[in-house]
Image: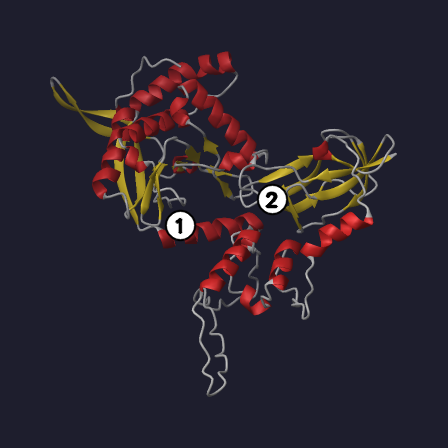
Amino acid sequence: MAEYKLLLPSMGEGVMEATVITWLFNEGDQVKEDDSVVEIATDKVDSDVPTPVSGKIVKILKQKDEVAKVGEAIAILEIEGEGGSTASEEGKTETPTPDAETIKAIEEPLNPTVTSPVEFSGDLYLSPLVKSIAQQENISESELKTIKGSGLEGRITKEDILSHVSNRGNQPQAVPQQSAPVQAAPTPPVVTSAPASTISVAAGDEIIPMDRMRKIIAENMVKAKHIAPHVTSFIETDVTNVVKWRAKNKDMFEKREGEKLTFMPIFVKAIVKAIQDFPMINVSINGDNIIKKKNINIGMATALPDGNLIVPVIKNADQLSLSGLAKAINDLAYRARNKKLRPEDTQGATYTISNVGSFGNLMGTPIIPQPQVAIMAIGAIVKKPAVLETKDGDVIAIRQLMFMSHSYDHRVVDGSLGGMMLKHVHDYLQNWDLNTEI
């Protein structure tokens, strides 16, 4: 028998760690190749980790709520075969055992002599690497608490602490006078936000702790509203032609492609065309610079069965046909609701659409996801009497009407740009060609 180390796999660019949500098997259980053995969570998505080999789980190395780095062993399996420990990312090659001299050569630069090692209470989560850097740089726990972490749930990453160390060296230093010793002034408290008001809890009230995803959503929404001054424009659109066209083509499309034809690919197609008309809506802000995006990647706000929200991304939406958009949207929506998204599926959006009409809402004022500068909400399609202009004069007819709302970042998108972009989406939908091919 041989040992096999199950490593945390790579989960996309920029994702360096994940939190263990729950193990689907226990120590001593037999697992088969491709079985999902553990559920993990990044700051983007929840997903499962399958095992690439069959065997018995002999040791779970990362317990629930513990954080693992990409490439770190999270469990040890006992598999058929001979030899020493094997690793999933290394093609089952044996891990060589270094000799004593090699170990000493490696450990000496990593473990400099520290006369007074910094101790931490454990109130602040620190990875072994971050803790090591803090000890080497003699950073106290109180100083660490002033560092704003960019990792999962605000945890301090290697980049955060190295940046702090770099800036720390650039801080102006007080020059002591020789005539009298200078005592260090007490460090002022760091106020990150106003304290929350106390909420009274009455008898019978239920206290429900936020889950991990809800905490992330809450943090991102507050951040988005804090950063971007929001302006929202509204328009009502006659989508009667869109409704007729879908009714004519949906059965044929499902029979041919095995996919359902929803309204979403039509909305995305119109938005993409409007973005091409107004490319300055497809930008991000970096300090005083505006980054004009080459790709058009459409985020699609998706409600999950547990009530949370996630935004998978249709990459290069401008290069997809209506049929391609329909397939991409159905695939992302299915995988989002079944926890099958990969971290890269939620990254890189340059513009977002939210279909509030799916909940029966007429309109909404959506919050712009950072670092994008605009988002569009699509309302419910409702039959209403409307005035039509004909060659014989105005008439009242029953039409399919829908509100759209466009929120945009007033730092870079003024009312003219935000309003004209919305009007172009309106025009594309209202003048939808009934002979459009799919």
Residue under the point 24% across and 38% down: 417
Instruction: Say which amino acid is labelled 2.
Output: Ala
Q: Earlier in the sequence, mark 1 or mark 2?
A: 2
Task: Rate crowding at label 1 as few (under 14), some (14 to 19) or many (20 or more) other CA atoms within 10 Å.
Answer: some
Task: Rate crowding at label 2 as few (under 14), some (14 to 19) or many (20 or more) other CA atoms within 10 Å.
Answer: many
Q: Secondary structure at mark 2?
A: strand
Q: Position of residue 213 (x, y in %)?
A: 54, 47
Q: Secondary structure at mark 1?
A: helix
In the picture, measured across the screen, residue 202 lies left or right of residue 244, that is right
Residue under the point 26% across and 41% down: 233
Which residue in the protein does label 1 denote?
224
Q: Is residue 134 above or below residue 369?
A: below
In the picture, measured across the screen, residue 261 lies left or right of residue 159, that is left
In the rendered image, the quadrant that contains the N terminus is: top right
Query: Does residue 43 appear in the picture of this structure?
Result: yes
Q: Is residue 395 above or below residue 5?
A: above
Q: Position of residue 152 (x, y in %)?
A: 56, 50
Which residue in the protein does label 2 denote?
41
